[in-house]
Image (cartoon, rainbow, N blue to C red):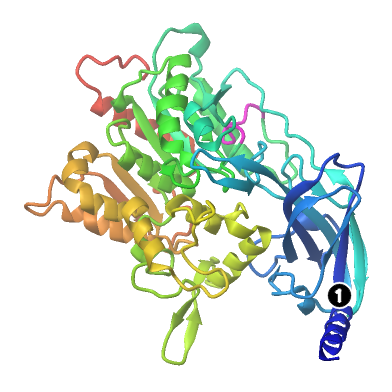
Amino acid sequence: MRVIILALIAALSLAAEPGFQIRLSPGIRPAPVDGRLIVVVSKKLEGEPRFQVSWGLETQQIFGMDVDGWKPGDTVEMRGNVMGAPLHTLADLPPGKYNVQAVLNVYQTFRRADGHVLKLHPDHGEGQRWNRSPGNLYSKPQQVEVAATSLTRLELTEVMPAIDPPKDTKYIRHVRIESRLLTQFWGRPVFLSASVLVPRDFDDSTQRYPVAFFQDHFSGDFRGFRETPPTGNGEHGFEAIAYEFYQDWTSGRLPRMLLVVTDHATPYYDDSYGVNTANAGPYGDALTQELYPVIEKQFRAIGEPWSRVLFGGSTGGWMTLAQQIFYPEYFGGAWGFCPDPVDFHAFQQTDLYTDKNAYFDQGPFERFPKMVGRLRNDHVLATMESFSRQEVVLGSRGRSGGQLDAFHATFGPTDAEGYPAKLWDSETGAIDPEVAKYWREHYDLTALLERDWERLGPKLQGKLHVTMGTKDTFYLDAAAHRMEQFLESTKQPGKGPYYGGSFEFGDNEPHCYLGKIPEGMPFMTHFVRVFAEYMKNRAPKGADLGWQ
């Protein structure tokens, strides 16, 4: 009798909660599918809810659950305790009128060389964007009234279309290669690609050129160069700057070199961070041993360390500095703008080595939340807990494609099943000290410089250049100050050689401060000149400088 009563209570409890029933249309896919099922519930009654999920207060509500072997024609139900963000469960959703849409982020099975079999979402040319990745499935938006006991029915009837590859132009060329190293690691073909901006006389010359490698998030093309005037309708900001750079590049006002944007999205994020990792594989080696040499050969690069520089901001800023540090003799200089945390004593607002929790500063009774970002007016962009929770809803096992999961996948080891080992518990924020130790030993850039300066110092003199705002949006300035403190200490007797690079901090400037650039001058125009002068000064005697 007690069992029957408990079953009745459970059934009544379910009936008292709103729910969603999602059907996989039988005509949309011929075979069962694995993936992350996401339902977006929006108070914005116009537009597609899948494009209304963001950071901070303006985000709409999401719920998520894994599906395995979902057969066409079958239905899946979300009820009660299904995880959500910002509301924690579906049971928390208040009655009301909403714009609702379901998305399935489709997983494929990977059989890695380390023996692990994983279900992950491969990138399809979009940069790990669950809401627009080709092949993902979704329902049409529909306005619904959600009541305390309602069951809203949705059906996945649409497939996100393929993205056309970028086309070559007179100035922008594209390269795509299969990486032998990454293919071996992942057990399936893996490709690397790049967009190459060539000089004005490239096709009519035999001149060899230096290279500036621009590190960024996945872009799909060279976005900072526009060959036609801006189109109006409020589009004159970025487009106007890109067009002005095109005019500078083609007019003879700038030194000639190759500018290269690389794309290397992984199953975990829109880029690999450019280093070898336990979770994503040997991307650092694949770039420096496979992709970069192909580019240099195909586009008549000089191909010497002094003629290669790196630059980039944010994630690209960290990658810029990391590649210079991990491959100190391959590159001749690195300009990292607003880099992701370069010292894990200041991992945004957390000291990973002394703090116990990534979400809160904890006292005997009181605790305060840690922020992941701030707005220009000092209001909160997001807390670490809310940011992390949203990623967990978008993908379990580190599969959200988001920034924090990218950190776990890049800096951490694998867990017992082969997925990224989490530095902190997703529910509580508790930090795992063993994982933190792994991060320090492998990817804390300041710790690596301190540990290996006797070996690295002579190879990095004059090569490291960091620019950061003192009011960085994501609290990245504290880590940059710590790196500067160590590098400046190399000037002291017995600690050398002196690093001889530079740090520039913009007073009260946010993410991503780019330094003192002449007013009205495009960022690229300024730094092409900076890089050209730098490489000319470091060129060996007798080097070909005809590219100036």
Q: Nearer the viewer, residue 502 or 26?
A: 26
Quadrant in which the N terminus is drawn = bottom right
Q: Position of residue 261 (x, y in %)?
A: 51, 33
- Residue 471 visible here: yes
- Which residue does the numbered mark 1 point to in the structure image? 18
Say if 509 sits above or below 312 in the image.
below
- Secondary structure of the magenta portion, mostly? loop
- Position of residue 324 in the picture relative to residue 458 (left or right): right
**Nearer-the-camera pick, 399 or 7:** 7
Question: The C terminus appears in which quarter of the rendering?
Answer: top left
Residue 86, image quadrant: bottom right
- Residue 8 lies, in percent from the top left, at 88, 85
Residue at the (46%, 20%) spot, across then down: 294
Report x, y in % for residue 275.
Answer: 42, 41
Q: Is 224 one of the magenta-colored residues?
A: yes
In the image, is residue 176 above or below residue 49?
above
Stretch in magenta: 220-228
- How far across and how far down the image is residue 125, in percent? 66, 36
Name the residue furthest front. Answer: 1
At x 64% / y 40%, what residue is drawn? 123
Q: Residue furthest left?
A: 493
Q: Amino acid at mark 1?
A: Pro
**Number of numbered discs overlaid on the protein picture:** 1
Q: Residue at x 41, y 69 (%)?
A: 350
> Dot 1 lies on which element?
loop
* Rendered view: 287 above or below 29: above
- The verdict on residue 45 being magenta is no
Q: Residues within 10 Å of mark 1 (few under 14, many from 20)?
A: many
Give the residue drawn at x 68%, y 28%.
165
- Image: 136 above or below 142: above
Camera-nearest residue between 8 and 44: 8
